[in-house]
Amino acid sequence: MTTTWTVTRTERHSHHSIIGASDNPDHARRQLYAVTAALIRRARADERPRYTLHIGEQLTAIIQTGDDRHGRPDHAATAELLTCMQHTGNPFGA
């Protein structure tokens, strides 16, 4: 059975979605995290995007870029959160 995944990156005036699919749910999850990590790496220093992740029709996560101690977007912390999510698995069992 094919498992689809979607990540939507939302900024103040725009949003961009990337959709993928895999024959294996675990592989779909790895693809979703890899694409999300790439989007985080490409974020401009002055933007605070929100990333909405779905596997199939199930909402997996909403990750909002926060600020560092100087009030700037903290993309490193956003990437670290995604890494932590990868190592905890899916609490919803999708």
Image (cartoon, rainbow, N blue to C red):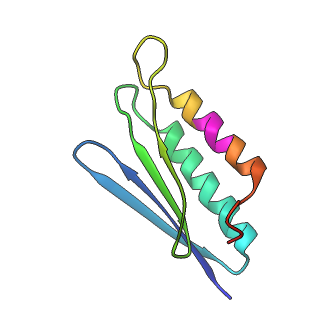
Q: Is residue 13 above or below residue 24?
A: above
Residue 60 lies, in percent from the top left, at 57, 60
Residue 35 appears at what percent x and percent y?
57, 54
Vertically, is 63 above or below 69? below
Count of numbered badges drawn on the protein = 0
The quadrant holding residue 66 is top left
**Residue 25 drawn above or below residue 91:** below
| The magenta segment | 79-83
Residue at image coords 62%, 38%: 81
Residue at (73%, 68%) from the top-left corner?
27
The quarter of the picture where the C terminus appears is bottom right
- Examine the residues drawn in magenta and state their main secondary structure: helix
Q: Is residue 19 magenta?
A: no
Task: Out of 22 and 84, give the one closest to the viewer.
Answer: 84
Q: Quadrant of the N terminus?
A: bottom right
Of all residues, the one furthest to the left in this rendering is 13
Residue at the spot 71% in from the left edge and 73% down from the top edge: 25
Q: Quadrant of residue 16?
A: bottom left
